[in-house]
Amino acid sequence: MRLFFPPFALVAAGLLPFIPERNVVSLVGDGWTVSNNALNVSVPASLPSQVHLDLFANQVIGDPYYGLNDFNLRWVAWSNWTYTSLPIAGLSSNVSSTWLLFNGLDTFTSISFCGHHVASTNNQFRQYWFDVSTITTSCDETERILSINFGSAPNIANAIASEPGQETWPSGVQQVFEFPNRCFIRKEQSDFGWDWGPAFAPAGPCIVDIYRQGQLNNLPPAQDVPWVGNASLDYFGQLPAGSILQYTLKDMQNITVASGAMSRVNQTNATVTGQTTIAARLVDLWWPNQLGNQTLYYITIDLVSASNTSLTCVTKRIGFRTIVLNESPIAQDQLAQGIAPGNNCHFEINGHEFYAKGSNFIPPDAFWPRVAVERMNQLFDSVVDGNQNMLRVWASGAYSPDFIYDLADEKGILLWSEFEFGDALYPIDPAFLDNVREEAEYNVRRVNHHPSLALWAGGNELENLELILVNQSAPDQLPRYMAEYETLFLNTLLPVVFGNSKSISYAPSSTSNGWLSLNFSNAKPMVERYYNLTPGSVYGETDFYNYEPSVLYNDSAYPIGRFSNEFGYHSMPSLQSWQSQISAKDLSFNSTTVMLRDHHPPAGLLNTSNTANASIGQAQMTEAVQLWYPIFQADLYVSEIEFYRRGSGLPNRQLGSLYWQLEDIWVAPAWAGIEYDGRWEVLHYAAKDIYEHVIIAPYYNVTTGNLSVWVTSDLWQPATGTVTFAWYDWSGKHLINTFITTILQGYNLTNAVLYMAVEAVSSLPNDNAFRTFRHENFFHPTALQVAQLVNPGLNLTYSPTTQNFTVSATSGVAAWVWLDYPAGAVLNFDSNAFWLLPNETRQVSYTLKSDTTNGGWINGVTVQSLWNQTLPL
Ligand code: BMA
C-alpha cells in the first residue's frame, strides 16, 4: 500500500514566476519522521518515499517483496500515517508571498504548517500549490514544521463507496483484484492489486506544443508546411501589462537555429500563450528507434516585461515530428490496393505509416521512489535491443515521470500514454470529474513537449470489455452506463487533450473499434463507432487472451484486426529471480508461497479464496507445458507476432503488435519478458528475433493440415532476396531441400523439422545504404513435447580475448538453445533461445548491465536445449 509518493515536494518562497530572485527551498531528503501514534511507531524518513520503504529501512517491517509479505503487511495500508518535518530553515519573512508546492501526494492528505491546517488533497496524479504567506510571516522559524497526514486509501475508498446515493455498477463489471473500490479514488489503480502484481497500495507547468501548420488532433497533417511552436505558461498572481513572450531554439550543440518574439500573445487569468512558426528547412526530424535519428532541440521561452526585463524563462527539450493515430475510414485508393473496408487503425510518423513493434509497460515497481534513472535506462536499452519502437504505458499504473519520457525521447521509444483508468467504470459526480480534469490538465501539459509521446488514450479495456460486461449483466442499463462512460472519456478527458495540444491524438478506450466520425466544428467532435460493425469490414485494435492450452498455436483462433495492443500468456520467472524474494524451502512450483504470489486470475473475479484462485494460474501453466513444452510461452508469442505481422500485407493491413507485458513489477508468475532485476526471459529474446525487420515464418492450419511460409518486411523500401528450405530429422540427417511436404510422405513427421531462411537486400528507413537482412526459422509438424528429440551434442566455450561465447551442436538439431547465467549479474546475450543445426556454430556476445560477482558469472554460464541436458562452461 503506497501512502506517499512525492517525486519532490517544495516549499517555495516568492514562487511568482516573474520575480527573478525567487527562493526555492527543497523538502527532498532527510529530516522527516513518519509516525502512527495508535501503533506506537515513529521512525526517521527521507523524501521522496513511501511508508513501506521507511518502515523497511528502519526494520519495523521486513522486505515488502519477500515471501508472503504482500499479504502480511496489509495492516500498513489499513492505517493512517503522518510525515513530519523538522523546522524548515531558509524561509524569509520579508518576501511578498510563500507557497507550498507538491508534485505528488499519494493520495488522501491533510496538510498543516506551523500548526495551522493548510489544505486537504485527494489525487495522487495532481500537482498542488498552496499560498502560506500569512502563516509563514506569523510563525517563528522554530515552529515552521510541515506535517502531512496520509489517510488509509482502502479505508477511504470503502467509505466513499458506502456513501448514500453513491454510484453502483451491475455485477461482474468492476474488476476487483485484492482491495475493492479503487474506482472511487484517484490513485494508481494497480496499488489495489493486479493479476501480475502485489497489493501494497503504498501510500503548473508550461506546455510546449510543436505541430505542423493547420494540424488537427487525430488527422494526418500536411508534411510540406512550416512547424508551429505554441507555448503557454502558467503563472501565479498579476502579470505586468505589456509583457511579451520570446523564444530561442537551439540545437544540441547549443547553436541557435531560430529566435524572436512570439505572436498572438494571449493572456487568461492564469496562463499566457504565444505562438511562432519555424521554417521546416531549419530543423531535422525526430524518428523512432530503427526508423531514423532521434534529433532533439532546446526551446527557451522567455516572458519579458514592457521594460525588457526577463520575468521568467522556461527551457524544454523538444523534437520535430508528427505522430498520428489514424482511425479514418479506409479510402478509395486503399480499397484499390486490396485493403479491406472499415477503419484504419495505425500510427503515422512524419507522414509515414510504420509497423509498431513493442509491448506493454506496467509500473516497474510497487514503490515508485525506488525507480531510479539508471534502472529505467537499462530497461529502455533492453527495449531498443529487443527491436521495439513503441511501448503502451498501460492505464491503471501511474503517469510516467518526465525522466522516463526523457529517456524515451533519446532512445526513440514511442510512448502510447494513457489516463489512469482501467477494467472498471468510474463515478461521474461533479467533484470526481473536476478532480479528474485537474489531473488530466496537469499531466497533458507536463509531457506534451516530448517527441516520444505517441497518443493519449482514456483507459484500458473499456469499450471492448467493461461496456460489454454491462450489456451481459444488465442489458437494460447499458444506455445509462454508456452515457456515463461518454461523460468521463469523451466529454471530460477529450477536451483536455484537444484544448491543450494539437499535436497528439486521443482515443477514449484502448481497445476499441475507433471513431465513427470526427468533426471539429461540433461541440463533441468525436463519435465512437462502438459495435456498429459491417461484416467483412475490419476496424480497430484487438486484445486477445486464451488460457485453454489446446487452442494455442491455432492461427484461426487469433483475432483479425488492424492493430494488436495486447495478447499473451503467463509463465514463471527464473530460479535466480525467485531466490531473491522467497526462501529456499518455498522454491517449488506448487509451494504455497509460489501459488499465493500467482495473482492470476484475480480473486475478485472468481469470488474464491486466494489459494483456490492461485492454483488456477499454476494449473494453466502446467497444462500448457504438458501439452506443448517448457518454453511454450515465448513460442506462443512468436506465433502470434508472426501472425499479426503477416497481416501488414493482407487485406486487414495490420500495423501493430504490442504484447503483454514488457517487464515484471516483482518476482511472480506473470506475462513479462524482462524480470524485476532486468534479466531477460526466453520471451524477450524470442520477441527480439521475431521483431527483426525481415522475418520468415511458417503458418500451419491445424484443421486443414496445410502449411505455408511467408516472408514479411517492415522496411519502407522493397526487399529482394532468396529463401532456403531444408528438411532434417532430429539427428540432423538432411532429408530434402524443398518446402513441398508431400515429398516427405513415408517419413515420420514427428521426427522431421523444416529449416527455413531468408536473405534479402534492402535499406533501412531514412538511410540509403543497402544492407543484407537475414532471418531463419524452424517448423516442426508435431508438438516438441512428443517430438523424438536426440542429444544434439552441445558444446560451449568462452574466449576472454573476444569476450564471446561459442556454442555448437555436434550430433543433432538443437531446439531452443538456452544460455543461462548465475545470480549476481544482470546481462543480456546478443542472441539466445535459438536453434542450431548439426555442425553449426554460433558466436554469442553479451552486454553486461550490473555485476556483483567480479566477473565470476562467466564461469557459471551453462547451455542447454530442449533435449534437456544442462552443460557447464
Ligand atoms: C489485460 C491487461 C491487464 C492484465 C492483462 C493480463 O486485461 O489490460 O489488465 O494484467 O490483461 O491478464
Image (cartoon, rainbow, N blue to C red):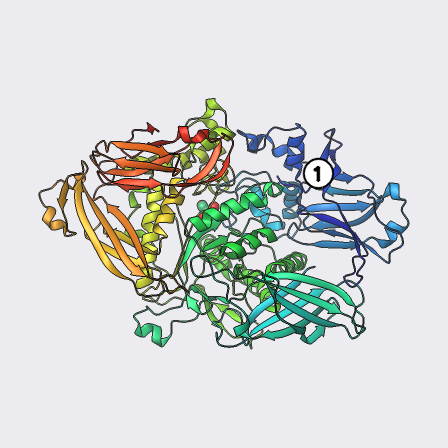
Q: Is residue 320 left or right of residue 553?
A: right
Q: Is residue 259 left or right of residue 653?
A: right
Visible residue check, residue 595: no
Location of the N terminus by quadrant is top right
Total labels: the figure holds 1
Q: Residue at x 52, y 31 (%)?
A: 852
Q: Look at the picture and state if 857 lies above or below 20.
A: above
**Label 1 is placed on what type of residue?**
Ser
Q: Nearer the viewer, residue 581 or 706?
A: 581
Residue 37 image-quadrant placement? top right
Instruction: Please state the horizontal and vertical placement of residue 147, each as a whole percent of the image.
Output: 78, 42
Few, some or many C-alpha atoms within 10 Å of disc 1 (few <14, some 14-19, many ≥20)?
Answer: many
Q: Residue furthest left?
A: 746
Q: Is mark 1 within 8 Å of ligand 1?
A: no
Q: Look at the picture and state if 867 lies above or below 14.
A: above
Q: Look at the picture and state if 830 lies above or below 303.
A: above
Q: Residue at x 87, y 42 (%)?
A: 143
Q: Nearer the viewer, residue 181 or 502?
A: 502
Instruction: Please state the horizontal and vertical placement of residue 476, each as a whole percent of the image.
Output: 48, 59
Instruction: Please state the horizontal and vertical placement of residue 520, each as a whole percent of the image.
Output: 54, 75
Q: Look at the picture and state if 813 lies above or below 95.
A: above
**Secondary structure found at label 1:** strand
Instruction: Name the residue tied to disc 1.
Output: 46
Location of the C terminus by quadrant is top left
Q: Residue at x 84, y 49 (%)?
A: 91
Instruction: Please state the horizontal and vertical placement of residue 549, each as a whole percent of the image.
Output: 32, 42
Residue 468 image-quadrant placement? bottom left
